Structures are given as structure tokens and as C-alpha cells.
Image: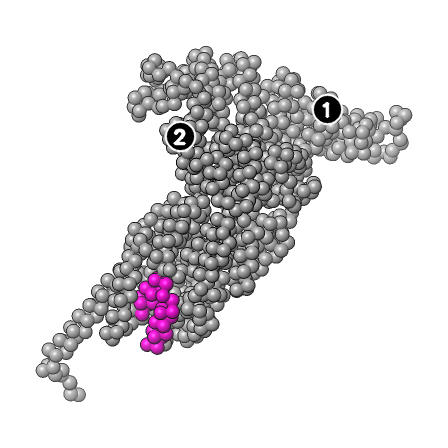
Amino acid sequence: MSRAWPNWRYLPLVAAGTLAVFTCQVGTCQTLSAASSAFKTGLYDQAMTTALKAIDQGRPSVRWWRLLIESTMALGRYEEAARYVDQALQDYPNSIVLWRMAADVLPYAGRSQQAARAVDLAYRLAASRPIDRMSADELVATGQVLLRLGGEPRIVLDQFYAPAMRADPNCLEAYLASGELAIEKQDYQLGARYFRQAIERFPDEPQAHLGLAKAFYPSDRRAMLDAIAKALQINPRHVPSLLLLAEHQVDCEDYGGADKSLAKALSVNPSHPEAWAFKALLAYLANDPNAAQTCRAQALRWWADNPRVDHLIGKKLSQRYRFAEGLQMQVKALQIDQAYLPARLQMAQDLLRLGSDQQGWDMVEQVHKQDPYNVTAYNLVCLRDRLRTFKTIQAGLLCIRMDPVHADVYGQQIVDLLQDAMVQLGRIYQYKPKGQITVEIFPNPQDFAVRTFAMPGAEGFLAVCFGNLITARAPSPNPPHNWHAVLWHEFTHAVTLGLSANKMPRWLSEGISVYEQGRRDPSWAYPTNEQYCKMIMHGQMPRLSELSEAFLDPPSPMHLQFAYYLSGLAVEFMIGQSGMEGIRAILSDLGKGLPIEKVLAKHLGPLDQLDQRFEAFARAKVAKVGCGLDWDQPAPGQVDQTDANSIMHYLQQRPNNLWALKALAQVQIADGQLDQASKTLERIIELYPQDVGQDNSYMLLAKVYQQMGLADREKAVLARLSDLCADASDAHMQLTELAQARQEWQELIKYGARYLAVDPMSCPMYVRMGKAYEACSHTDQAIEAYRKALLLGPEDPADINYRLARLLKDADPAAARGHILEALALAPRFRQGYKLLLQIVARPDGTRPVRSGSEVQD
């Protein structure tokens, strides 16, 4: 067999041609990389010009077309982008990626029907190709197409996005698409994981940082803002990041800041639908319906059948508690697209908060059936099933829904409390609720979170008022909170939100509720503690106009409580300036849609002067707290807080230093110097009687007195703390123990009631209270206490049944007989029980009927 040899004469020419092709490809890649970098940094015109030049020079590729289309879209040139899509598909009619892009782009040019056909064609192309022969980009595009056609998200993740990442670990689109899908289904942790992976490989990709910001948006606004800052550092003209920032600013009620962010976005893309939707939202919030309609029309100018515009406006209105207006916008969105599930789900939540429960739950069920992977819909469906087991208490305009056992134990107390609130607050604010007010109490904190926020979590929240709906966690001693104060606070919201048509800023709403709970009972008031005093005196308090932001993103739970405290202080200041008439007038003007800045200026004077006056008022207020007290702490290492001599030396220079006095008391207790410790603690309380927070000096002094055997002093200091702080459950409990030991039954009843206002499900306390009521001959109250104890499972149910039988034997012999038989079933050798049974079954004349031998005989 002969062998063919290469023609060596032509080898240099072949090599030269290969080198020329390679050089051209390298040059093209370098140019494409530079153009892509320009796009990422916001130089959209430059990227578009470079892409057009490359295509005109006969170097078209899918990547160049994609860059051209994306750059044109970023500038809001929608019709131009659609023409480029048409041209690209002429060159690459079999590109799944380009057909998927067509589905995204064409609606913006008013070509929604063609966009739908593009989805269908992309699907047909994908179906004709084996998955294992698709590129990573094609796998991602196919997964996105399947999602549009109703494909299961888990299948898309597992069979398209994950293989794309394995095939090409540097496929940015795979990470972004995976993260966006997770966020769409409210799986924010999974979404954050994908976006972090993208950032590890592409640290200069603003879209990845934006995705991480979206993942943090519901839970961690500080991390969200950090991620947006990184995205905007890379690309200051990144419109999606500017829009998320504007949304956050709306949530903070920083409408001026939001308007500036939107102006930046519109300077890049004057046609962006979501930017105009947010402009419409700001107009609605400013009570300018004409401007709102103009902005909405601008948002729908290019894509008239875009349901997201009305959905976005309505969702944000609902987040401002304007549910009726939000509901109307969801109706408009669904008129455009009946299949748009985000609008259906938001509409369902609006209906549930407006009291249309059956319609709302039916719509939640529909969404869940259509999208089983939607976390919000799934959570709500599960919650609906649990709510069906709740007991409903109807009392006039009040509808209370609770766990049946909780309802039997303290449901009537809730009714009594809220009816009292309705009368008192109605008189103060000259307001009567319109329609039924529903209160739902959840023993499971996660159920409360789902009902309130549609997602588990909500740590730190005890209750939320949406207007005529109040949701609350069931009372718990850990941490202790007086549930009477909590519900009074929330019912105040129902009144003020009703008066203002849900158009008041959060700080004012919270401030009035804080003020009213303190007016109802001084022991319910927010105490002026050490941290608050320091923050106010050191100039760390926000202005009135910035108070709402303090609620949204507090750096710590203490800062959140400080926001509540400051809001209450602000309302106290405003009432001092204009009286209750002024507060009612402010609420009325807000209800008419006037912005808070104009309303405050109208009733209280110029805002800059108002801020100054409020700061002066707050400083004067805290200056009266711990008058003469030194709040500063020594520099690290200046004082050894374990050495009494070191502390005493410091106190010689600063005798009223709170930090040093508390440190000295701790050292004296540790050294067994109880007499000295009691004097130090007494000195602290004398200087700072408002010290009622955690680890307060009252409880420490009571413990010292107990160890010294000074029961009277122990009781006195505990009683003082109990009077000052309704949340002081440990003090309430210890006072009942002291009263029981001394058989001071009225005292036990007094402090037992205070403890039950924190922990109404305490079985031992009901037993203790029952015995106190018995001793005071309060038969009805004793019966009620023992019945509640039985519901909660006492340690000795036989004894409780016996006590109930004894109390009921004259008034209700049948019930008494049932209780004593239950006691004997539990304790068959209970001789006093048998004697009581014989008394109960005896005839009025003292004789007993003849019974069979199986019956009890003398």
C-alpha cells in the first residue's frame, strides 16, 4: 500500500493562514470581552456601538447579537431591540438562546403574541435536540422556556440548570437563573447560595450582586444595601439595582430618596416600566391620582399587556397597609393577564386582610394547585387547615379566633379588654370601628409569622395590626410580655389606621400606640432605660422624618425597642404642643391624603424647627431620669471590675457612676458582703428608680434581702418593681409565693393576676389563685380558677376535682357529682372524697336512696 505524503511546498502558506485565523479570533474575543466589560460597567452606548460594528464587519455571532440586544434594551430602545432580534434570528434561526431572548424582548415592543410564538419555537427546537448535546447556555435557555410553559421548578433546576453548571462552571447565566428561580419561589436561602457562587466566579458582575441583594431583601436590609452598593460601585447606571434601592427607600418612607433613585434609573432608560410603576406608586402615596395615572400610562406605553406594572403598584400599596387600593390594582393586573399568579397570590392576601376570608382562602388554594412550589401559597394552605381547628368568639364587632384550650382559659378576658379599649379609645379619638375587627391568636409562633408575613420567622414581633385584622402570638413567659398591654397597643392601631385611612407613617402609628398603652396603665409604658438615655444625650436619635426607617432596619433588637420608645416620646411631645385635638386633626389630614411633612408643618410648625424642639424635649425628658447619675463607662483597663478596691477608688472620683455602682454590688455579693451590697443597690435604686429592665437592681436587691432573711424588705422591693413594670413576671411570681407562705390571700390574688397577664396558661398559678379565692370565700372566682387549672393539666387533678366538687355541691350537684367521681377514679383510696360523694348524693332530708351493692355504702 502506497503512502501519501504532505505537500511540504504549501505548508508555510497553511501555517500562515492558520495563524491569521487564530489572530482574528483572539482579536474578536478581546473586542467582545472589552465590549462586555463596557456593558457591565454601564457604558451601554459604547457596548452597543462596538457590537454593531462587529456585526457590520461580518463577524456576527450569537454572543455579539446578545450583547447588542441587551445594550439596546438597557437604554430603553425597545423597538430597535426588537428589530435586532429579528435580524439575529435571520442569521441564527435555530438558536434556542435567541428565541428565548425574543420572548423577553418582543413584549416591550408591543409584540406579545409573537413573543408567545417565540416561546413555542424555542421549545420545539429544544425538544428536537438531545439534552446531552446542548451547550450550557442552551440548557439554561431551555429551562427558562420550560418554566414559562409551566414546567416544574425542581425538574428545571435538576435537569437543566445544574447540568449547565457542570458542563461549564463559568456559565454565569446558570447561576443567575437558578438564583432567580429560588427567589421567585421564596426560597431566599437557596437563592443567596447560587448568587454567592456566581460572585465567587464573577466578582465584577453587578447582576450577581443584585441577586444577592434580592435574597437578603426580606430578612436583612443591611446586607441587602451592601450588595446593592457593590452592584452600583461596578455599574452606577445599573437600573435594576437603582429600582431595588428605590423600593427599599419607599419601605423606609424616604419618598424623596426614592424619587432621586428613580430619576437616575430613568436617565439611563427613560422607558423602563417598573421605574414608571414606582413613579405611579409615589404619586398614589402623595394622593395625586392624576399623576399616578399619567405614570401608569407611561409604564404601559410600550408593553400594554404587562401585568407586572399594576401588580407592583398594588403590592407596595398593600405593604403600606392600603389593602383596598392594593386589591384594586391586582384586579387590574388580572384583567390584563388572568394567569398571572403573583397578582392572584397578592390578591388572596389582600382579601384575607380585608376580612373576605372565604374568597381569600379559595384563591390561595387555586394558586397552590397551579404552582405547588410556591412557598407562600404552600405556607398559607397549611395555615388555613390549622385555622379550621380554632375556636371563634363573637362579641359585637369583635371576632376572636384562638386555639380552643387558650380560648377557654383566657378568651373572655380578651373580649373584656378589647371592649374596654373600644369604648375608651373611641371616646378619646372620636372614632367607632367600621365593620368587624378580627383578632387571631396563634400558639405556634411560625403560624403567626405565616399569617402575618406569609413566611416563617418574624422573631421579635408579638402582634401586628393591619387595620381591622390583628394577628398575635399567644402569650408566653419567655420572654415576658404583658399581653393586655400588647393587645391594647394593637387595638390603638386599629383606631388610628381607621381614622387616617391607613395613610399614616409607621412611626406615628407606633408612637400613638406606645403613648396610649402607657396612658392606660403606667406599668405598661416603655421604660426610659440606661441605653436610651445615653443614645439621646449623645445625639444618636433620628429626626422625626427618619423614625420609620429605624423600624425597618434596626442594627439590634435594642435599637428596634428604641425606635418604639422614641416614637412614643414624639407623640407625647406633639400632644404637649397641640393637644389631643391636634393629634386628631393630624390623623384626619393624613386620611385625606396629605403628606406627613405638610401635615406636621401645618399643625406644629416648620420641620427643621420641629426636629430641634423635639430633640430638646427628648433631652430634657431623659435628663430627669437618674437625675445626677453618671452614665459613662471607664476606658477598658482603667478599672478592674472584679476588684472592690479598684472600683471604690474610681467611685471616689465619680460617686454616682452607674457602671461602677453595679460592678461594686456584684463584687460585694460575690464576697458575701450582703449588708454592703444591699446599701449599694439601695443607692442605685435611689438614683435610678426607672431601672426595671433585664438584670435590674430591684431583683438583685430582693435576692440579697432573701439571703439576709429580711422577708419584709424583700417583699417591699419586689412590690415596687411589680408596680413599675407589668412585664416583671419573676417579681409577680415571687410575691405570690411570699403571700402564700404568709396566707395573705388578697395579696396573692393581686400579684397572681399580674402574673397571669404575662403567662395566662400557667396551671400552677390557677391552682394557687383558686386556693386564695377559696380562703377569701370568693366561690365563683375559685371555681373558675380550678376549671382553668383542669384544662391545663394540674399535677394533682384528683385534688382539683375534689375542690370543685366541694364548691359546687350546693349550687350544681350534678356537676359536683361528676367532679368527685373523677377524683375517685384518679385516687380510689381518697376517703374524704367518698365522704363528699355521700353528701352530694344524699336526699334533701338527709337520707340516702337505696342503691345496688355495687354503689358506695357506709
Q: Report the front residue among 496 and 128.
A: 496
CA gap between label 2 and label 1 equals 50 Å
The amino acid on which the numbered mark 2 sits, given as a three-letter code, is: Met
Q: Are marks 2 and 1 in contact (CB under 8 Å)?
A: no
Residue 693 image position (x, y, % from top left): 48, 27
Residue 821 lies in the magenta-colored region: no
| In the image: residue 794, left or right of residue 49 | right
Magenta-highlighted residues: 65-92
Q: Residue furthest bottom?
A: 1
Point out the tag, 2 or 1, that comes first from the N-terminus. Answer: 2
Residue 549 image position (x, y, % from top left): 43, 41
Q: Is residue 812 visible?
A: yes
Q: Report the front residue among 233 and 270.
A: 270
Q: Residue at x 52, y 64 (%)?
A: 336
Residue 699 versus residue 109 in the image, above or below: above
Q: Report the front residue among 833 and 628.
A: 628
Tag 1: Cα neighbours inside 10 Å, few (<14), some, or many (≥20)? few
Q: Which mark is residue 778?
A: 1
Q: Which mark is residue 535?
A: 2
Q: Residue furthest left?
A: 9
> Magenta-highlighted stretch: main secondary structure?
helix
